[in-house]
Image: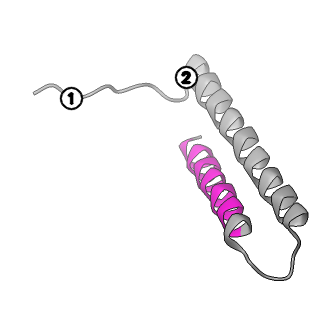
Amino acid sequence: MKTVMVLLLIAVLGALAGAGVFMLRKDGDDEAARSKHMARALALRVALSVALFALILLSWFMGWVRPSGLPTG
């Protein structure tokens, strides 16, 4: 389960990087097309972040992961 969470986190970062690439690209594409691609990448990032949060909550309720807290020493 932790592997799935890490993969989702990497996908969130990838979607964020993709939006950054669309934002910074200055080739022949028109502004409207770049904005559309960037908005779609950011919407994907938000959807993946919500899915990751829901998966963490589900895993916690099911007992698959447990918060360990900070070690006191």
Front one among 36 and 15: 36
Q: In this view, does 35 lie to the left or right of 3?
A: right
User: In front: 36, or 47?
Assistant: 36
**What span is in magenta?**
2-21
Residue 31, given in percent of the width and then of the height, sits at 85, 66
The quadrant of the image that shows the C terminus is: top left
> Neighbour class for label 1 at 10 Å: few (<14), some, many (≥20)?
few
Q: Quadrant of residue 70?
A: top left
Q: Which amino acid does label 2 sit on?
A: Trp
In percent of width and height, residue 45 lies at: 70, 47
Query: Furthest residue to the bottom?
Result: 28
Q: In which quarter of the image is residue 62?
A: top right
Q: Is mark 1 on a helix, strand or loop?
A: loop
Q: Viewed as shown, does residue 27 lie left or right of 56?
A: right
Chain-order first, disc 2 or disc 1: 2
- The x, y position of residue 3, in whole percent, is 57, 49
Three-letter amino acid code at disc 1? Pro
Specify the label residue 71 is tagged with.
Answer: 1
Image point 65% across, 63% down: which residue?
20
| Residue appearing at x 50%, y 29% in the figure | 65
In-image side of 51 versus 63 (left or right): right
Q: What element carries label 2?
A: helix
Image quadrant containing the N terminus: top right
Front-most of residues 49 and 55 = 49
